[in-house]
Amino acid sequence: MKRIMVIEDDKHLLEALKQTLENENYEVVTALDGEEGLSKIRDLPCHLAIVDIILPQKEGVETIADLKRYYGETIKILAISGGGEIEAETYLQLAMRMGADATLDKPFHMDELKDKIDQLIGDKTT
């Protein structure tokens, strides 16, 4: 079973993402900020990290850079942001420059999320 880390500070969205991904047969690890996410991923390596850009403690862009520095291509990264059209686009462009493999603007439909995940990590079981 593939493992996905979700780093999101909105507790309601975090729970919705966790539930959706578990229903799709992924193992899900969650964190409310970048520091917590990086700490957890050391013990539980993941195939994919879904990282919100605006986070407390350690910003998403910095978290993405650290994930790529420490884990390289062994982890795919999906950056998400809903900071308003202009802000979200700017943040997501920066996330791509820092190593994100794909981006998604909030709010998004869960089907869009599932499609992005399939593109990034493919089959759930390998």
Image: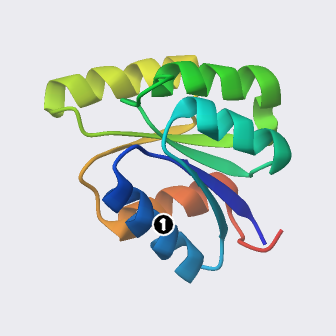
Disc 1 target residue: 114
Q: Residue at x 58, y 56 (%)?
A: 119
Picture coordinates of residue 33 (x, y %)?
A: 50, 36
Q: Residues within 10 Å of mark 1 (few under 14, many from 20)?
A: some
Quadrant into which the C terminus falls: bottom right
- Residue 114: x and y in percent read 48, 66
For residue 43, above or below residue 91: below
Residue 50 seen in render: yes
Residue type, label 1: Lys
Query: What kind of element bears circle 1?
Result: helix
The residue depicted at 74 percent of the width and 43 percent of the height is 41
Q: What's the colour scheme?
A: rainbow
Judge by depth and name the residue closer to the eye, 18 or 104: 18
Q: Is residue 75 visible?
A: no
Looking at the picture, how far across and down is residue 9, in whole percent? 39, 43
Front-most of residues 93 and 39: 39
Q: Residue at x 48, y 74 (%)?
A: 19
The number of discs equals 1
Residue 20 place in picture, x, y as percent: 46, 74
- Taking the spot 49% from the left edge, 22% from the top edge, the residue there is 61
- Which of the 4 image quarters holds residue 108? bottom left
Q: Where, by quadrant of the figure, is residue 117 drawn?
A: bottom right
Q: Is residue 24 above or below residue 75?
A: below
Position of residue 93 relative to residue 74, above or below, is above
For the N terminus, the quadrant is bottom right
